[in-house]
Amino acid sequence: MRSSDAATLVRVGLVFVIVYLIIAKIAPWLNVLLIAIAFATDWIDGYLAVREESGGAVGLVLYLSAALGNKKAKARIAPIKANISKHAPHGPRMDVAGDRVMEYAFWLAFIYVLFYAMGTIAGAVAIFVVLLVVVRHAFADALMGARGTSSKMNTKFARVFYTSNASRGAINVVKFLAFAYLVLFYALDYPAYIEYALVALLFLIIMLRGAAEIYESTRFN
């Protein structure tokens, strides 16, 4: 098994631990740390995949430079990523699957928390929010899967709101804040309005990125 695939599986296994700790209200600050580690493994498996495909030629500094938008570094890594899709096409799909498992698990925990802590009405609203997220991912993933890859976007709308470093950075930061704060809101009675604001912002970003994916795929499929 490739080390990048192993990192994805570690992330999936860690999600089960995190969700259990959320529901049981055990060690909330430790759980926040575990959530941070889970998000970090999403970046680590990408680095491991590129490093493996390059035979160790891509170091951490080069990969970080590309992730931060260095054009020369991105140009060096781009053909390596293209080769990954040819030689190990399951890898990028496994990465997406791991992302979806983690995100859906956290959304399910969000529904549970709102039903338990805030009552039926809040929980019902949460269900419809999560349902819209699931629908967005299902259609965007299907359309982009038919296209073959989401690494290269042709439309400016998709490049700005989906593949840009700002867009990717924003959604990862807001996801972490929303789900990490969920732990503190539920276990330590932190203010609910902050959680609602973070979830609303996350929902907006998810829908905007989904619109960019769907627009791109319908324009160029």
Image (cartoon, rainbow, N blue to C red):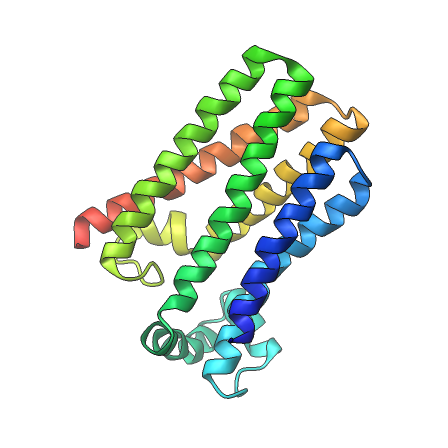
Judging depth in this view, the residue of 221 and 96 nearest the camera is 96
Q: Please provide percent x and percent y for residue 158.
A: 32, 50
Q: Is residue 106 above or below residue 130?
A: below
Q: Please provide percent x and percent y for residue 93.
A: 39, 61
Q: Is residue 9 above or below residue 107?
A: below
Q: Please provide percent x and percent y for residue 202.
A: 52, 36
Which quadrant is the C terminus positioned in? bottom left
Q: Is residue 133 above or below residue 75?
A: above
Judging depth in this view, the residue of 18 and 145 nearest the camera is 18
Q: Is residue 15 above or below residue 110?
A: below
Is residue 113 at all visible to an observer of this figure?
yes
Q: Please provide percent x and percent y for residue 91.
A: 42, 68
Q: Quadrant of residue 71?
A: bottom left
Instruction: Count the labels in the image.
Output: 0
Taking 120 as reference, is 53 left or right?
left
Residue located at (58% from left, 39% from top)? 106
Residue located at (48% from left, 33% from top)? 203
Is residue 65 at all visible to an observer of this figure?
no
Residue located at (18% from left, 49% from top)? 219
Q: Quadrant of residue 41?
A: bottom right
